[in-house]
Image: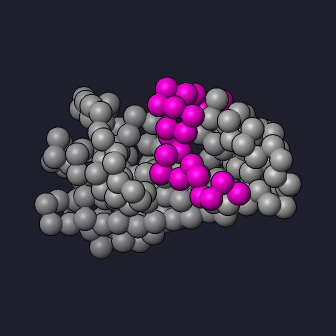
Amino acid sequence: MMELMIATGNSHKVEEIGRILAPLGMTAVSAKEKGIDLGDVVEDGDTFAANAYIKAKHAYDLCRQPVIADDSGLCVDALGGRPGVYSARYGGEDSTYIEKISLLLKELKDVPEEDRGAHFSCAVCCILDDDTVIEVEGRCEGKIALAPSGEGGFGYDPVFTVNGVSFAQLSGEEKDKYSHRGNALRKLREALLPYSAIL
């Protein structure tokens, strides 16, 4: 199994990425598992792709092995695309996702169900070596529910619905079929195919 370091402290993301890349004979490991402290990275890009590259380059410079980083967020139509690239900082740097979801639902309290369209976007950057950078993006269209539901997932999953079901109500494998990250990672998997035998 070839090893790709995932530049995140989020174990759910490592698991999700590992699931989708496993058919290539690749395994995903976290920076923590590698004993690497990524420290604080200033994500000052104005797009998901820019932030994904910033994180990937930072991690690659530290470990000098193939790395993957992603940046993703929730874009709500009725909020003009907010929170967007600020999804993780929505409501303040230290706010929990319960607080973020509460704020989101408060902002949308007067918005009718038919106008609660939203999408998740995900940009993935994979740096294999000094000369090889692969960048892909994925998207998933859905709606913001009136209230959270489901026990699974993470982040905004309890209020993001596809076909009336929240991401938090889906199994990991079911979510992969629809999710923005799943869509992006399938593109990455295809792009990595020529490299899978030589990494």
Q: Which colouring convention does the figure follow? A: one colour
Q: Dividing the picture into quarters, in which one does residue 101 lie?
A: top right
Relative to residue 195, is residue 179 drawn left or right?
Answer: right
Q: Is residue 95 above or below residue 126?
A: above
- Nearer-the-camera pick, 169 or 79: 79
Q: Is residue 12 above or below residue 186?
A: above
Q: Is residue 79 above or below residue 105?
A: below
Q: Dividing the picture into quarters, in which one does residue 123 lie?
A: bottom left
Does the magenta-highlighted stretch encompass residue 158? Answer: no
Tell me the residue at 85%/55% (across/down). Answer: 113
The spot of residue 81 in percent (x, y) is: 59, 58
Tell me the residue at 57%/28% (across/down). Answer: 96
The spot of residue 157 in percent (x, y) is: 66, 44
Q: Does the image show residue 30?
A: yes
- Nearer-the-camera pick, 86 or 52: 86
Tell me the residue at 34%/58% (across/down). Answer: 50
Relative to residue 164, is residue 1 drawn left or right?
Answer: left
- Nearer-the-camera pick, 49 or 116: 116
Relative to residue 125, is residue 132 drawn left or right?
Answer: left
Q: Dividing the picture into quarters, in which one does residue 34 lie?
A: top left
Q: Does the image show residue 170?
A: no
Relative to residue 104, is residue 23 drawn left or right?
Answer: left
Q: Quadrant of the C terminus?
A: bottom left
The spot of residue 183 in percent (x, y) is: 54, 64
Q: Is residue 191 above or below residue 27?
A: below
Q: How many marks?
A: 0
The spot of residue 110 in percent (x, y) is: 83, 47
First to last magenta residue range: 78-98
- Nearer-the-camera pick, 180 or 145: 145
Tell me the residue at 13%/60% (across/down). Answer: 130
